[in-house]
Amino acid sequence: GCFYWRLALFAFAIPIIGIQLLVLLSLGIGYVYIKFVFVVQALGMEQSNVKQAFANAWQVSQKRFWGIFLYLIVLMVIGAVLDSIATIASGLFPNDLLSIVALGIVWSISLAFSGLAMSYYYAEKKLGKS
């Protein structure tokens, strides 16, 4: 009798512990991502080495963590809207090749917009210019 209760408790606890660990891991990865999201901009704009670029990215995010988080959410929403428009527009073309070209064009615009927006943010916050 007691063995089955322990087995049931163990079988119930493992998924809950797994979900908690997954949430903690996701939060940790998200934190590190936000802290180092501007490494590419630091490398390009300041022409620093990799170690200095990581330090600069960390410095920019030091007091702006939640601002960067919200900025990334806004960029994701804009990207999702552009992707939705591209998907709808691609359905208007009778030819699959034209649909693929239309998707590629809109996705390129979305990628360029995100890259420029991230560079603009970094320039404003780190270098104090736009």
Image: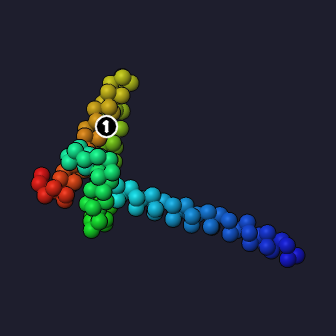
Between 33 and 100, the one nearer to me in the picture: 33
10 Å crowding of disc 1: few (<14), some (14-19), many (20+): some
- Vertical position of residue 20 compared to residue 32: above or below: below
Q: Is residue 61 left or right of residue 9?
A: left
Q: Quadrant of the N terminus?
A: bottom right
Identify the residue position indicated by label 1 in the image: 107
Furthest residue in direction right, as rendered? 1
Between 58 and 96, the one lying in front of the other is 58
Tell me the residue at 27%/61% (across/down): 59
Q: Position of residue 72 (x, y in %)?
A: 31, 56
**Residue 111 appears anywhere in the view:** yes
Q: Position of residue 85 (x, y in %)?
A: 30, 41
Residue type at tag 1: Trp
Residue at 48% across, 59% down: 26
Percent coordinates x, y for residue 81 in the rendering: 30, 47
Residue 53, above or below 20: above
Q: Position of residue 79 (x, y in %)?
A: 31, 47
How are the residues colored? rainbow
Q: Is residue 125 left or right of residue 36?
A: left
Write down the quadrant of residue 92 in the picture: top left
Residue at 32% x, 47% y: name it: 50
Residue 86 relative to residue 124: left or right:
right
For the point 34% across and 59% down, the residue is: 35
Task: Look at the image and tell me whether residue 113 can be seen.
Answer: no
Q: Does 65 appear above or below 111? A: below
> What kind of element bears circle 1?
helix
